[in-house]
Image: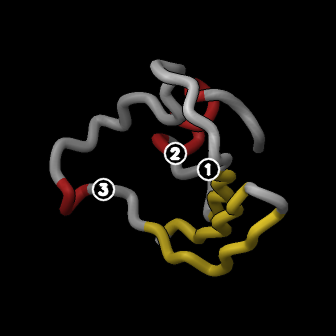
């Protein structure tokens, strides 16, 4: 699923994904839109945990392929 913060937040809250692919582009644009909204997680022990499977570089971008555990 590719989407904005509202879709990504809903998918994570409802445990509908087991994989997360994050693309990091070397650009700074100042204040922007959040990637993930409030997941009602209030401490680090409750945080969603990721296991990084693969890191790729495509041009200037970095792609991180992770599994949610």
Q: Position of residue 59 (x, y in %)?
A: 83, 60
Give me the C-alpha separation between circle 1 and circle 3: 16 Å
Q: Position of residue 62 (x, y in %)?
A: 69, 61
Q: Nearer the viewer, residue 36 or 62?
A: 62
Q: Is label 2 in contact with label 3 (beta carbons under 8 Å)?
A: no
> In terms of secondary structure, where does tag 3 sit?
loop
Q: Residue at x 63, y 38 (%)?
A: 27
Q: Is residue 55 above or below residue 26?
A: below
- Colour logic: secondary structure
Q: Position of residue 67 (x, y in %)?
A: 58, 70
Give me the C-alpha separation between circle 1 and circle 2: 6 Å
Q: Is label 1 in contact with label 2 (beta carbons under 8 Å)?
A: yes
Residue ID for mark 3: 47
Label drawn at residue 12: 2
Total labels drawn:
3
> In terms of secondary structure, where does tag 1 sit?
loop
Neighbours of disc 1 within 10 Å: few (<14), some (14-19), many (20+): few
Neighbours of disc 2 within 10 Å: few (<14), some (14-19), many (20+): some
> In terms of secondary structure, where does tag 2 sit?
helix
Q: Residue at x 73, y 56 (%)?
A: 61
Q: Residue at x 67, y 79 (%)?
A: 54
Label drawn at residue 16: 1
Q: Which quadrant does the N terminus fall into?
A: top right
Q: Position of residue 14 (x, y in %)?
A: 51, 43
Foreground disc of the pair 1, 2: 2
- Among numbered discs 2 and 3, the one appearing first in the sequence: 2
> As drawn, is 28 to the left or to the right of 59?
left
Label drawn at residue 31: none
Q: Is label 1 in contact with label 3 (beta carbons under 8 Å)?
A: no
């Amino acid at each position: 699923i590719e989407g904005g913060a509202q879709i990504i937040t809903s998918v994570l809250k409802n445990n509908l994904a087991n994989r997360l692919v994050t693309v990091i582009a070397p650009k700074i644009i100042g204040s922007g839109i959040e990637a993930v909204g409030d997941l009602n997680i209030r401490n680090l022990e409750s945080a969603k945990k990721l296991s990084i499977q693969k890191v790729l570089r495509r041009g200037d971008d970095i792609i991180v392929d992770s599994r949610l555990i």
